Amino acid sequence: MSEAYFRVESGALGPEENFLSLDDILMSHEKLPVRTEIPMPRLGAFFLDRSGGSETDNAIPQGSKLELPLWLAKGLFDNKRRILSVELPKIYQEGWRTVFSADANVVDLHKMGPHFYGFGSQLLHFDSPENADISQSLLQTFIGRFRRIMDSSQNAYNEDTSALVARLDEMERGLFQTGQKGLNDFQCWEKGQASQITASNLVQNYKKRKFTDMED
Amino acid sequence: MLCEKAMELVRELHRAAEGRLPAFNEDGLRQVLEEMKALYEQNQSDVNEAKSGGRSDLIPTIRFRHCSLLRNQRCALAYLYDRLLRIRALRWEYGSVLPSDLRFHMSAEEMEWFNHYKKSLATYMRSLGGEEGLDITQDMKPPKSLYIEVRCLKDYGEFEVDDGTSVLLKKNSQHFLPRWKCEQLIRQGVLEHVLS
C-alpha cells in the first residue's frame, strides 16, 4: 500500500455511509428487491418489461416488483411508504440467519454480495420489523468468523493468501489486509530492516508498469 | 439515468490499487455532467407541468431523477477528491518534481492544486525549527547513522556532496554518503540503501 495515500474509509457499518468513500459508493450500488406503491410516469423506458405503455404516460405501474440499487431505494423510501416498499434480500431473511447461527464460518460471504456487513447495516434504514434480528445476526456472524480471520492473517507470512480470503466479504478482507501489514511490519523490524530507507510501493509499482509498457 | 458512467469512474479508481494515479478521465467526467444536465432539464420541465398542469402524479418521477442527480454528483466528487488524495501522496513519496508520465495523467487543475500544495508544505516547513526550517519529508524511518552505504540502481550522473566534491552515480557503483543527501534518491528508486 502506498504509505502516504489515505483513502476515505467506509462508514457503512455506522449510522451513515461516508459521502466521499469509494467503498461506500460501490456498496450502495448493490441491488435489493422493492415494490412500487404508486405509478411512476415517464420512467418506463428504464424498465421496459414493466412499462405500462404510452396510454399511462410510459409509467412503471403501481405494484411492480423491481430490483433497484440501494442508493435509489434509500432516496425514494419514506416511513409512510408512499413511493415504494422494500423487501429484504434472502441472505438477511430468517432462513439464512439460521444458517449463519449454525456455523458462520462455512458461508462464502463474498459470493453473497461482497459487502455483506455494510449493505446489511444500511438495510436497517428501511424500518423492517426484523431489524433487531438482522442486526443481531450481522454481529454474531462477524463474531463467529473473526477468530479465523485474525489467526490466518497473523500466520500467513510470505505466502499466497488467495484461498484464505476467497470467502471473505470486503470488510473482512480489509481486516485481513491490516493484519498482514502488521505482521509484515513486525517481521521487518525483527530482521533489523526497520531503519532501511526504501523506495515506496508507489514508485516500485510504477516502475514495474513502465517496463511492461515498453515491452508491448 | 442509473448512473452507470459515474460508476465506471469510481470503479476505475478503485481498481487502481496501491495509490496509483490513472490518467484523468476527462471524457467520462464530461459524460456524467451531460447526464446530469439532461436529468435537470427533464425535471425542470416536469416540475412546471406538475405545478401549472396539475400533474402531481409526476412527483415520484421528479424525485427519482433528483436521486440520480445527487448520485452522479456524489460519484463525480468522490472521483475528483480521491484523485487529489493520490496526488498529495505523490509529493510525499516522489518529491516535488514528478516524472513526466505522471504529470500527463493529471488535469491542468490537478497540476495547479499540486503546485499550491507544494507551496503550502514548503511554507509550513520553513516556519518550523527556527532559522533554516525543517524538512519533514526526510527521515521517514528513524535514522541510525549520519552516513549510509548506497548502491546505484541506474545511471544518474554527477551528484554533488556538501563539501563541493562530486560523485559519479553509475549503475552498480557503491558509495558512502550522507543520509540526508540520499534519502530522496533512494525513495525514487535511483539508489538502494545497503545494510551492513
Image (cartoon, coloured by chain):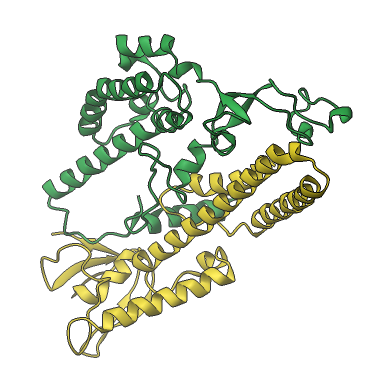
Chain colours: A green, B yellow
Horizontal relation, residue A96 to residue B192: left or right: right
Residue closer to the observer: A126 or A22: A126
Relative to A109, say whether B6 is above or below: below
Instruction: Indicate the quadrant where residue B11 lies.
Output: top right
| Image location of residue B93, percent across then percent down | 35, 64
- Which residue lies most toward the right here? A55
The N terminus of chain B is located in which quarter? Answer: top right
Which residue is found at the position 54% from the left and 47% from the top? Answer: B10
> What x and y, as percent, mark residue B114?
46, 72
* Quadrant for the C terminus of chain B in the image: bottom left
Horizontally, is A89 left or right of B6 in the view? left
> Is residue A139 or residue A142 the one in the foreground?
A139
Indicate the position of residue B157 as horizontal and vertical percent values. Answer: 38, 77
Considering depth in this image, is A52 or B107 the residue closer to the camera? A52
Instruction: Give residue B126's quadrant in the image.
Output: bottom left
A179 in relation to A151, above or below? below
Residue ID at (48%, 26%): A113
Quadrant for residue B87, please give it.
bottom left
